[in-house]
Amino acid sequence: MIHAPRQTGKTTLLRNLSRKLTQEGRYAALTCSLENFTQPDPERMLPRILAQLEYDAQRQLPKELNPPAQEAYTAVPDLALQQYLSDWAEQITCPLVIFFDEIDSLPGAVLLSLLRQLRNGYCSRPAPFPLSIALVGLKDVRDYKISLRQDAESLGTASPFNIKARSLTMRNFNQEEVQALLEQYTQATGQPFTTEAAAEIFRLTQGQPWLTNALAAQLVTDYDALIKDRSCPITKEAVNKAREILIERRDTHLDSLTDKLREKRVRAVIEPIMVGKAEFDQAFDNDFVYAKNLGLVSDARGRLEIANPIYQEIIPRVLTYPVQMAIPDEPAWFVTEDGTLDIMKLIKGFIRFWQRNGEVLLRGMPYHEAAPHLVFMAYLQRVINSGGSIEREFAIGTGRADLVIDFKGRQDIIELKLLRGSYTRTEGVEQVARYATWLCRDRGYLVIFDPTEERPWEERGRVETKSCKGVKVIVLEA
């Protein structure tokens, strides 16, 4: 198994690898994509897979390594692939290696038929059969087992997954590799990236290949490149402008990820991360691995969190977009005469909105436990759109969501919490004070949502001020 999230370069790597292996003369290696075989009918799909193998081999391999004509093998689909690969391996002079790309595309019945035929061919060796086969897609083998085997069903005693030798994945770029990639852009365009810009690109993307290339391209090589003057170096400020363009543009890669947010297994992982929850059910480990394989979450830094700051930004924006559209307040109302943001006015505006709309919004939000956080972030995003940015940090076990607002050069910290016990307020005040001090601010803001609150909605929204370590902490209980 070779599994990695979309747009990490799997197909590009494998096509180059199979081409190189064949050119070396020791193997007949090819990559075959299965993305078109989506109908749940093995009798129709297996013969078409043979036709695809024949087509790819004719274009990727020398004539002497081509397979037999596939028409002779289609009479019995349940044996077609096994017999075809056996005869192909027998008639050529070097070992056969196949990378089946986009294995995720196959419906359950077709996937099981393919796996069982591969297993039968493997077990028949030393009779001729491919030396090695890789199944390539988003998911590891355990996720195929989970999706194909329901609690009351069995795949049979001879599991088709037993032939797996190893599961490999493709990691993100590390910081040195991101730097090397940016140097390639500089070589192509003559436009340098400052050290701070390169560090910011890595921080925002955590080396995710598609994001890294998309940011760099938006900065220097796209038709609408942000910095068109090739003599101007790329700065950190320019990188953050490109980030906003990328998020708002929502290319296919980002849309495909956000589509996954609607899946129950993904929601079971993203929601606890958003609210900092540390308790989960028995299925969480499998769900986390699934979401990690999709590239949405990570445990690379020793805690479970959303995979990178760009995803941290786009996920709540996607989940809150309908709410943002329902907010009547104008961003300009909250901007002071000196151009900074009036946070207290913003909080009072949110209280009015929450009192009038909170009950209805909570019922309609798909992420029910995280709904209060999402409604507040939607309101905040509506205001910040007038000229600022939000840096969000979510992680399981922290018990909080941190929001750092950067508006006209001034940073403010707002921390969101769900009321878990008497300790929530005390810990929250201390955390806000500590973070505000780190930002060189003498005040910060703590918003606490009580999921058990029974007061009428029009009475919610008490605000008080606490003092901690020289920092004023404004506490809103919603």
Image (cartoon, rainbow, N blue to C red):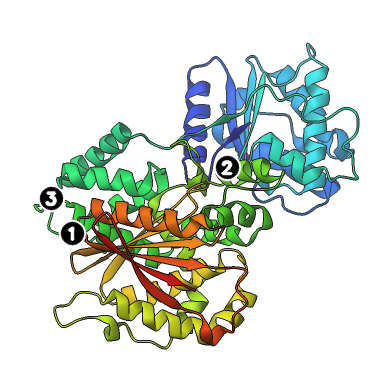
- Give whichever of 148, 251 is nearer the camera: 148
The answer to whether the residues at label 2 and label 3 have Cβ atoms under 8 Å apart is: no
- Give whichever of 409, 39 is nearer the camera: 409
Callout 2 secondary element: helix
Indicate the position of residue 274 as horizontal and vertical percent values: 51, 57
Q: Amino acid at mark 2?
A: Asn
- The residue beneath circle 3 is 233
Q: Relative to 355, is 314 above or below?
A: above
| Residue farthest toward the left in the current orientation of the protein | 231
Q: Amino acid at mark 3?
A: Pro
Instruction: Locate residue 34 relative to residue 193 in the image: left or right.
Output: right
- The residue beneath circle 2 is 293
Q: Dot 3, crowdedness within 10 Å: few (<14), some or many (≥20)?
A: some
In this view of the protein, can residue 337 be seen by the observer?
Answer: yes
Q: CA distance from mark 2 to mark 1?
A: 34 Å
Q: Which mark is residue 227?
A: 1
